[in-house]
Image (cartoon, grey):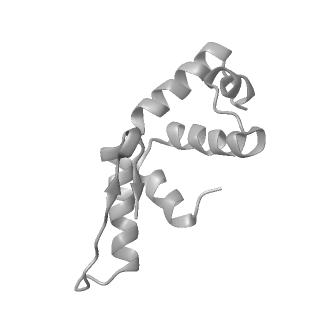
Amino acid sequence: MLPQSYQIHLQRQLSPQHWRILHHLLLLIQVFHSVNLESLATLLPIAMTFASRRQALQRLLTALDIQTHWFRLITALLKARFSPHSTLYVILNRTNGNTAIY
């Protein structure tokens, strides 16, 4: 699934409900290799109606913005792996709308 450091960080940042949905969502994507919102909402093992599961997924995906969660996660990982006095070059490639870190 996710490395332990990612899990700890996301559990701190997300509400318990969003964390539970994200956990199930990642497991479903690994098993079924599908990223269709409708099919994931159908397969999500949470006791809600289909419409509520779909709405919960939409809320979660909206809440996972890059500035709130992913920049903090990247910052925490960099601080854990590199000493504060070393030089680190981070290159972001945003060609064609995709972001890659080298």
Q: Position of residue 79 (x, y in %)?
A: 33, 74
Q: Seen from this angle, which residue lies furthest right? A: 31
Q: Is residue 75 above or below residue 41?
A: below
Percent x, y of residue 58: 50, 25
Residue farthest along the left direction in this orientation: 85
How far from the left and from the top, in percent, is residue 1?
65, 56
Quarter containing the C terminus: bottom left
Residue 31 vs residue 71: left or right?
right
**Location of residue 101 in the rendering, given as x and y in whole percent from the top left corner:** 40, 60
Residue 5 versus residue 20: which sits nearer the camera? Answer: 5
Q: In this image, 64 relative to 45: left or right?
A: left
What count of labels does the image hold? 0
Q: Is residue 48 above or below residue 97?
A: above
Q: Residue at x 39, y 76 (%)?
A: 80
Which residue is painted at 67% across and 16% down in the image?
50
> In the figure, is residue 85 to the left or right of 98?
left
Q: Identify the residue shown where x is 72% and y is 39%.
A: 33
- Residue name at image x 71 percent, y 46 percent: 30
Q: Is residue 21 left or right of residue 82?
A: right
Q: Tell me where residue 65 sits by quadrant.
A: top left
Taking depth in this image into account, of 95 and 82 the one nearest to the observer is 95
Q: Quadrant of residue 14?
A: top left
Residue 54 lies in quadrant: top right
Furthest toward the front, the residue is 96
